[in-house]
Amino acid sequence: MFIAYNDKGSFTKDLGITTNQFLVQGLNVSVLGSEYSRFQALGGTGTVWSLQATNQNDFGANPFEINTWITKNSSQVAGNLTNALFNNASQNLAGFFAQSDLSANNAGIGLDAGVNNIEWTGLVGTEDYANGYTNLGNTYGASSAVGEAADIVYLTSSGPFASSKVLVVPFTTVQVNFDGSTITAAATLAPIPEPSTYAMLMAGLVGLGFVARRRQA
């Protein structure tokens, strides 16, 4: 999921791409269109962006029960998030994605209308506004300024202790950027780690498309 937000509203776009596709094909996706124009027409300032996905298989007491793929801005320390904050924020993020889908569907531009990669603009003060969710409840620096590249990391709980730090797997060879109209990332052709090591294929996702939530719907 791509998310951009500013002081007036937010824009979300489901990119619908898996881990394998992302590593082999890279990314070059335009956000331009009627919904992004609606976001721009709000006239907001200070726009930042991020890519994120989350998948919940259980309550998050053990590694790989909650899996989140997310961009990391240049100032964020990779592994300083606790299990408790991570689990709560990831579940709230999943709820936000579902709410965005519902709003788009109610407006006639969602799954019921045959739209696969849903886009939606949320206004400040509504439940569709992304700020807060995008940075894991303002506990993690996922958002970057337009034109600023960001790394991607995989996060999961390290165990049942709430105050322990999450497990972090950085994609050190992958950087994503957004120039205000296009989301880009070069293909790495890097092999995907074994599931037994990183559990990267448990949801078949990277922080680019929350596909699992649609299957559940």
Image: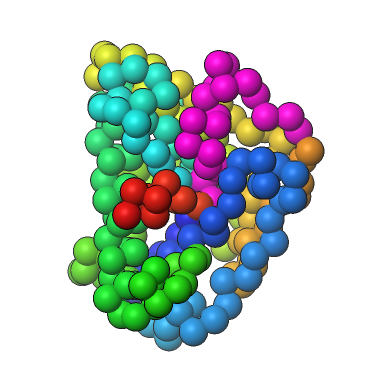
In x, y percent, where is residue 97? Answer: 34, 55
Which x, y percent locates residue 43?
41, 82
Of residues 190 and 44, the one drawn nearer to the viewer in this rendering? 190
- Quarter of the image with the C terminus is bottom left
Residue at left offset 34%, top offset 31%: 57
User: Is residue 92 in sight in this rendering?
Assistant: yes
Q: Quadrant of residue 126?
A: bottom left
Who's the residue at 27% across and 76% down the image?
106
Q: Is residue 50 left or right of residue 17?
A: left
Is 196 part of what is drawn in magenta?
yes
Q: Nearer the viewer, residue 113 or 44?
A: 113
Q: Residue at x 53, y 39 (%)?
A: 204
Q: Which corner quadrant of the image does residue 140 belong to?
A: top left
Q: What secondary structure prevails in the magenta region? A: loop
Q: Is residue 38 above or below residue 45?
A: below
Q: Position of residue 64 (x, y in %)?
A: 42, 24
Which residue sits furthest right? 189
The residue under the point 63% across, 33% down is 171
Q: Position of residue 131 (x, y in %)?
A: 33, 58
**Residue 197 counted in the magenta span:** yes
Query: Relative to 202, does residue 90 appear above or below in the rendering?
Result: below
Query: In the rendered image, is residue 120 in sight?
Result: no
Q: Which residues are magenta?
A: 190-208
Rendering colour mode: rainbow
Q: Quadrant of residue 96?
A: bottom left
